[in-house]
Image (tube, coloured by chain):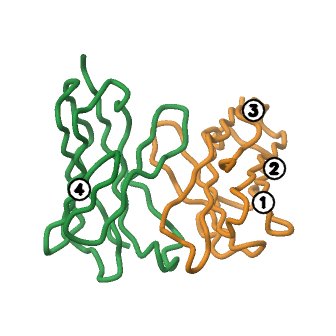
Amino acid sequence: EAGVTQFPSHSVIEKGQTVTLRCDPISGHDNLYWYRRVMGKEIKFLLHFVKESKQDESGMPNNRFLAERTGGTYSTLKVQPAELEDSGVYFCASSREGSGNTGELFFGEGSRLTVL
Amino acid sequence: LAKTTQPISMDSYEGQEVNITCSHNNIATNDYITWYQQFPSQGPRFIIQGYKTKVTNEVASLFIPADRKSSTLSLPRVSLSDTAVYYCLVGDMKMNRDDKIIFGKGTRLHILP
């Protein structure tokens, strides 16, 4: 079974540019989460999808961040325009929904974003 | 969401048993206790989860006292490869009501040769 995959693994962009991060959850996992770790800080929740619906997006920093999950499969997280403080590692995680949920989150390797 | 408190860092030697304790005084009735491990440049990885008493798997044991206000992750005979950050999480995860699974600062475990 393939794990959660994220792309790109590392992106370096200039302030004001746009970046789109992609996450492919484990097949059959309806729950998809985005987290972010800024250098030296804790891993912070960004948002949670159940299938294609946003269940909770209270952790999204501001309106420069847009997450989508069309069709309830893969998800994208777009940052536009990027600012210096957006630099960090963005993690995606998935889990099963309902009775199949064991409480375990499966994380990807993360996408490191560097904004210069 | 119950807040957790765990040591910032710990050192141990290869072959030793390591115990990391987490305090969660405000744990709710429906909350489970879950531990994750994270290596540098990787995403967190599930280690073990429990509700009460003791849980053991091929990687670790989790001890939870009757009042559930704390828990102890026990790693038997650690090796250098166990050097990582260990997170204790508390929440109603199995019912999926805890949409925001909160990561604290974690415990940075350093295994010495």
Residue that appears at 78% across and 32% down:
A13
Left or right of B33 in this view: A87: right
Q: CA distance from mark 1 to mark 2?
A: 8 Å
**Amino acid under disc 4:** Cys
Give coordinates of residue A98: x percent, y percent: 59, 79
Question: Mark on residue A80?
Answer: 2
What colour denotes chain A?
Answer: orange
What colour denotes chain B?
Answer: green
For label 1, the crowd category at 10 Å Cα-Cα, with few meaning under 14, some 14 to 19 and many 20 or more, is some
Pointer 3 or 2: first along the chain = 3
Which chain is home to disc 1? A
Return the residue at label 3: A11
**Callout 2: helix, strand or loop?**
loop
Pointer 1 or 2: first along the chain = 1
Q: CA distance from mark 1 to mark 3?
A: 17 Å
For label 2, the crowd category at 10 Å Cα-Cα, with few meaning under 14, some 14 to 19 and many 20 or more, is some
For label 4, the crowd category at 10 Å Cα-Cα, with few meaning under 14, some 14 to 19 and many 20 or more, is many
Give coordinates of residue B94: x percent, y percent: 46, 75
The image quadrant that residue B65 belongs to is bottom left
Which chain is home to disc 4? B
Return the residue at label 1: A66
**Amino acid under disc 3:** Ser
**Amino acid under disc 2:** Gln
Q: CA distance from mark 3 to mark 2?
A: 14 Å
- Tell me whether the residue at label 1 lies in contact with that at label 2, contact meaning CB atoms closer than 8 angstroms: yes
**Placement of B112 over or under A49, stated as above or below:** above
For label 3, the crowd category at 10 Å Cα-Cα, with few meaning under 14, some 14 to 19 and many 20 or more, is some
